[in-house]
Image (cartoon, helix red, strand yellow):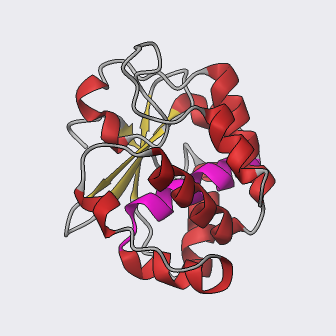
Amino acid sequence: QHQVGGRVATQEEFPRLHNAIDGLCLSHGIEVPVLRVLDSHSVNIATLSTRKESTLVVTSGTLISLGVVELEGILALALVRMQEPRLIKETQKSFWMTIPLARFFIRNDVETDDILLLDQKSVALTRFPPGLVGALEIADRVGTFVEGSSSTSQLWILDPTAQLATSGHPSPSLRCAALSEL
């Protein structure tokens, strides 16, 4: 949390965020993460996990810019990204062939195939691809840049350094095109 920042997202201040994450977690047996909000106009979420707890840091722009369906889609992506391989294996049973993802979770660099596969897995949680597609399209329009994120870019689900030419994340338009194939 200290690397990324943000303030605690209380139920009173952010009921829509809590309702969306609670619904996803309860319906899939996932422990509800700590929720934080970072003041930024961009659409992005950082995922942090330790042995003690998992944390999602959601930009305020995400909450302002996305509707309920899109918010659920992008939160599902964040949950898939921070979960242990147990969730990924359960998701794969009904949607895709089993492909080991352990290398994604222990590596710091970002590979396009891994990100596209995680997008597919998040859609399996919501069973509604247009939610994530809509979130990615809005993120592409609004922007994903997060001030001071160059040292923590691997924690963000969308490229937080989008203003830089050295981005390692696939573009939202590429991700939408891949999801439209489902």
Image position of 104 with respect to 170: above or below: below
Q: Is residue 73 magenta?
A: yes
Q: Is residue 133 magenta?
A: no
Residue 97 can be seen in this image: yes
Q: Residue at x 66, y 70 (%)?
A: 124
Residue 18 can be seen in this image: no
> In the rendered view, does 84 fall on the left or right side of 25?
left
> In the rendered view, does 106 fall on the left or right side of 128?
left
Image position of 153 with respect to 145: above or below: below
| Residue 100, quarter of picture | bottom left
> In the rendered view, does 81 fall on the left or right side of 61?
left
Quadrant where the N terminus is found in the figure: top left
Q: Residue at x 23, y 28 (%)?
A: 151
Which residue range is magenta in the image? 68-84
> In the rendered view, does 4 fall on the left or right side of 64?
left
Q: Name the foreground residue: 176 vs 66.
A: 176
Residue 180 placed where, x, y %? 79, 50
